[in-house]
Amino acid sequence: MKTVDAILNRALVGEDLSPDEGVVLLQQTEPLAITAIQETANQLRCQQVGDVVTYVINRNINFTNICEQHCSFCAFRRDAGTDGAYWLEWGQILEKTADAVQRGATEICMQGGLNPQAKINGASLPYYLQLVETIKKEFPQLHLHAFSPQEVQFIAQQDGLSYAQVIGTLQAAGVGSMPGTAAEVLDDEVRRILCPEKTNTAAWLEIIGTAHQLGMPTTSTMLSGHIETPQQQIAHLEKLRSLQQTACDRAYPGSITEFILLPFVGQEAPKPLRSRVGRDQPVLSDALLLTAVARIFLGNWIPNHQPSWVKLGLDGATEALRWGCNDLGGTLMEEHITTMAGAMGGTCMEVETLQNAIGSVGRPYQERDTLYRF
Ligand code: SF4
């Protein structure tokens, strides 16, 4: 307990923890130690960002679930022409966007499967540009939070372009920020089992770093609670922290806006990983401890922390507000990827529901935009 106190005291005076110290915190099982970690995370959250809890009115649009990859946790992907495969028409995308605007959305979050057929004139980038232009032409005021590092790599590989060319072109067309998804756990041993066809750790870091250099903000995520160890969790956080330090030190025009913890939901995931993990829903206590440690480890550099109500349910996500989080995420309006994996948090939140959840922990709420401006 002495060691834990010493580590937490260092954090409370504003020092960055070492990876070893982070691992010590994650390995605690005694209730007293866990309470001390929670209280420290909560205090740091208050010092770093205050008491206000934010949310964003947004809509997810997953334009296709046809994907050439086979991530072992993914229940969303389909092969073209098989049951449940879909690929939205331009008109459907516009309809969904118009509905979102009518419901007050300021952001469209757009990601999809890696569909090699999604091309215009034989090239992938023009298809993605058409997605952007379809939305931005009618609704220029909307912030487009779109295309993960995995999608950037896919486009670059399909068309023989550099990451900078892909990101710069999407940015010029109107993409405002990049989801920091596809990070899963930034450890190539874990990735070999979880997502062997996806970008490796170095490429994910390179793409996010390139976005920052080009002035495109990104989020950051971690898929937790499957086969990874505490050491791998902290190494992941360390990589995110150092990406952000680089963006600050070099005064890049873009940086990481938030950290989102995504606990693994395995209910409908392909059987091998599901059996290996041995449970269908996240363990809330594990997710909360990691939430608190992420605040303590990252908060000096990445001040905004968001739980996933889709993965944890609204009650679990609301509880995470007491463990270092200061944001409750978006209304989403529709969520497919995790819901198809068996998540029970729902697919849509009304603004009032989010506000009431925030109020239930005695904190004030405030709508934000994608970049945390009020
Ligand atoms: S997680 Fe994404 S890249 Fe992996 S199989 Fe599913 S849709 Fe494809």
Image (cartoon, grey):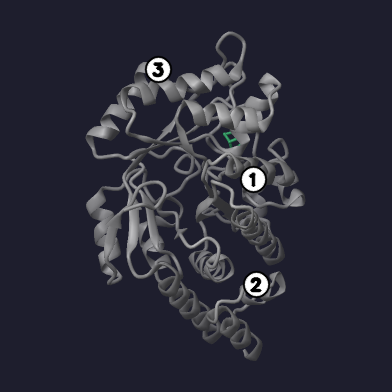
Seen from this angle, which residue lies furthest top?
Answer: 121
| Beta carbon of the mark 1 residue lies under 8 A of ligand 1 | no
> Is 9 positioned to the left or the right of 193 in the image?
left
At label 3, the amino acid type is Trp
Task: From the viewer's side, name the closer residue of 74 and 83.
Answer: 74
Q: CA distance from mark 2 to mark 3?
A: 47 Å
The three-letter amino acid code for the residue at tag 1 is Gly
Q: Is residue 242 above or below residue 79?
A: below
Residue at image mark 1: 209
Where is residue 132, by image quadrant?
Answer: top left
Residue at 52%, 40% in the rendered image: 178
Mark 2, residue position: 22
Nearest the eye: 368 or 57: 368
Count residues near mark 2 (Cα–Cα under 10 Å), then give few for <14, some for 14-19, many for 20+: many
**Amino acid identity at mark 2:** Gly
Q: Position of residue 71 (x, y in %)?
A: 64, 38
Q: Which of label 1 and label 3 is nearer to you?
A: 1
Q: Secondary structure at mark 1?
A: helix
Q: Which residue is the extreme one toward the bottom?
A: 2
- Tell me the tag on residue 90: 3
Q: Nearer the viewer, residue 360 or 201?
A: 201
The first of marks 1 and 3 along the sequence is 3
Mark 1 vs mark 2: give the one in front. 1
The 10 Å Cα crowd at callout 3, few under 14, some 14 to 19, many 20 or more, is few
Q: Residue 52, position in %: x, y?
A: 32, 65
SS assignment at label 2: helix
